[in-house]
Image (cartoon, rainbow, N blue to C red):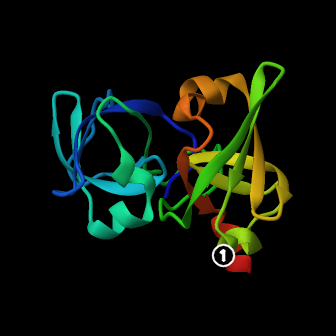
Amino acid sequence: MFTGIIEEVGKVKEFSGKKGVLILQTSFPDLRTGESVSVNGVCLTVSRTEKGLASFDLSPETLQKTGLGRLKIGQSVNLERALRLGDRLGGHLVTGHIDGKGKILAIKKTGAGKEMTFLFPTEIKKYLAVKGSVAIEGISLTIAGLSGNRLSIALIPYTLNKTNLGEKRVGDEVNLEVDIIARYLK
């Protein structure tokens, strides 16, 4: 389980979709083999660590159902380590099991922040509500607006500077995970 509060933005050092191997640069000091890490919202297992690098094996299903298959060397990724029992829950409960891919439709400057509008798959609409939670690229966010298959999010400067959302452009795809409580209530 994760909270959707991003701890670090890492960089893609190596990636091979055909081999299903992803190597990231990270500053997590005590990251260990076997540990779960959310990478852009996808729960992955560390297969190897070495001097600030973490390796992950990616299954064909992960590459197909998430946006990880489109990663490029040098690209930024959101990272969060798994919760420990007793940790403060600053976001919402996030599993790292992606429900669908979304697409950025619009980015509008709003004061010091931005509002982003996303297109989402029809099948997840029943789990979304205005003022409800959604994880986008692993980030715990509050839905500001819903209209058809579009949702909007108001982003503060901190989120734009401390996650990879500040680098995203219109047309980019993102990983989406609905709120786990909304899923089970439905």
Element type where label 1 sits in the image: helix
Query: Which residue lies most toward the front here?
Result: 171
The image quadrant of residue 15 is top left
Q: Position of residue 11 (x, y in %)?
A: 34, 31
Query: In the shown orientation, is residue 68 left or right of residue 24?
Result: right
Q: Position of residue 116 (x, y in %)?
A: 72, 40
Q: Residue drawn at (51%, 53%), measured in percent from left and top?
A: 2
User: As rendered, which of 57 and 172 lies closer to the eye?
Assistant: 172
Query: In the shown orientation, is residue 91 left or right of residue 68?
Result: right
The residue that disc 1 covers is 123
Q: Is residue 10 above or below residue 16?
A: above
Dot 1 amino acid type: Glu
Q: Residue drawn at (78%, 47%), measured in percent from left and top?
A: 152
The image quadrant of residue 60 is bottom left
Q: Residue drawn at (59%, 35%), measured in percent from left and top?
A: 169
User: As rendered, which of 75 and 105 lies closer to the eye?
Assistant: 105
Q: Position of residue 141 (x, y in %)?
A: 69, 46
Q: Position of residue 46 (x, y in %)?
A: 25, 50
Q: Residue drawn at (48%, 59%), measured in percent from left and top?
A: 96
Q: Residues within 10 Å of mark 1 (few under 14, many from 20)?
A: few
Q: Is residue 70 above or below residue 168?
A: below
Query: In the shown orientation, is residue 155 left or right of residue 65?
Result: right
User: As rendered, which of 168 and 79 lies closer to the eye?
Assistant: 168
Whether residue 136 is visible:
yes
Query: Which residue lies most toward the top here?
Result: 112
Query: In the shown orientation, is residue 71 left or right of residue 133?
Result: left
Q: Quadrant of the C terminus?
A: bottom right
